[in-house]
Image: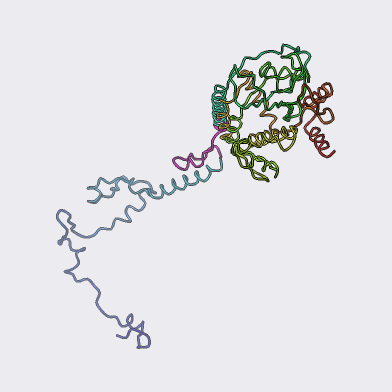
Amino acid sequence: MPRFDNEGFNPNKRINNDSRDRSVPEGENYYKNPGNDFGYGDRRMTGDVIDNQNKYTDVWSSPRDENLEPPQRNYRQIQQEYNPEVLRDFDAQRRRENREIARQRQQQPKQRSERPKHSGAAAKKRSKPSAKKILAAIIAVLLAILLSGILLLTAVLSRINYDDSIPNQYVASGQLENSMSVTNILLLGVDARPTEESETSRADTMMLVSIDRKHHCIKMTSFLRDTWVYVPAMQGEQRLNAASAYGGYSGVVDAIEYNFGIDIDGYVVADFEMFKVLVDSIGGVDVTVTQAEAKEVTNHKKRYGNVKLDAGEQRLTGEQALAYCRIRKIDTDFVRTKRQRTVIQSILKEVKKGNPFKLAKMALNSAPYIETNLSKGKLMLVAMAAATCLRGDMVQQKVPFEGTWEYAYKNGMSVIAINIEQNKQMLIDAIYNKTAEQINAENANAENG
């Protein structure tokens, strides 16, 4: 038979010319033959097929016919204990529930208080420390620093050598100029730390360190050792550095207070060995060395301990700094004390930088070489006062002041004769009244004039 139109296929031909017999042979009509049955096992169907669809069509919508028989349950329903609930669409219900849960989750982030809590790594990453925790951490760090500072300060104070404080027997404290905002400490430098029996050695360096909290600065005043003054301990006139030979370190304090009218809170004695240890502990000091100073130290090895100096801006070790401070042959004692103040000022600059490890090392190493008549409590107060003023300027000056002195011979000795009253008033004014800027300006004018 042709399959396509171009092959001559006529769709009406089959319908019009189809004369085949499509009736079911009588012997094969199982539905109308009640005598034939078929089935499997006990499941057997016999007789004609009865169509009851029309009979039960309106069983739920129309009045119930009492004579109407209910539909019979088939074998599968009987075996599985048929339950009409299985006909419910559980999948549809689950889909509705899932949509409702998703809608609720979308609404939750909009409410800040109802955001879901995270756990595990996400919670650790997103959690922020509270203000109380931050404050507690800060307090803990401050307490640790404070405790470390107290322990270090206690260790330093325990290494220092303490003298008994002897009040001035020659002048009443009420006659001395003083201020609650100024602390005066007399720094004495000696060739070696003496014992009680050898305290009569002369002080090589006498420098008053004034901690001025009113003007927020530190003032360093050198007293020239050849200054001719009245020494109360010997009840006569003598060079200032000879006062320790008659009254010990307290005798020097008494002589300065008696002649210049200022109240000195205490003294600190340091030998040359301490000076070297102190400088080395902070890694050296920066000093500008002249050609004459370098030549003096380098060419006199025996005098300065076999030390070599180079001219120019130098970083001096403890040995070199000590030799630099002791130069005396090339110029006057005025210049020598200026070199000493320059090194002390350089040391304070290093302290001002505030490297805690260097400061701790410096304090611990230097403490055994220090002797003082200040108590531990007063030393702590002095240290705290100095810490507040280190941020300000550091200025230096000398006694006698310019225009108040002249060289003279006393008892066959070359000394510096001074106007006592004039120097007294100028020193009091500089320590208690003047600012660091005023003192620097006066020093500049003196050098240029």
Provide residue 63's location: percent of width, then percent of height: 37, 46
Most common secondary structure along the magenta stretch: helix
Q: Is residue 248 above or below residue 19?
A: above
Provide residue 148's location: percent of width, then percent of height: 54, 28
Q: In terms of image quadrants, where is residue 14?
A: bottom left
Q: Is residue 130 above or below residue 31?
A: above
Q: In terms of image quadrants, where is residue 422?
A: top right
Q: Residue at x 70, y 21 (%)?
A: 242
Q: In terms of image quadrants, where is residue 249?
A: top right
Q: Residue at x 42, y 49 (%)?
A: 95
Position of the N terminus by quadrant: bottom left
Provide residue 90's location: percent of width, then percent of height: 37, 48
Q: Residue at x 65, y 43 (%)?
A: 314
Q: How many marks?
A: 0
Q: Residue furthest front?
A: 412
Is 338 or 388 nearer to us in this picture? 338
Position of the C terminus by quadrant: top right
Left or right of residue 158, residue 287 in this image: right
Is 445 or 228 nearer to us in this picture? 228
Residue 433 is a magenta residue? no
Is 302 or 173 nearer to us in this picture? 302
Provide residue 196's location: percent of width, then percent of height: 59, 17
Residues rendered magenta in the picture:
112-136
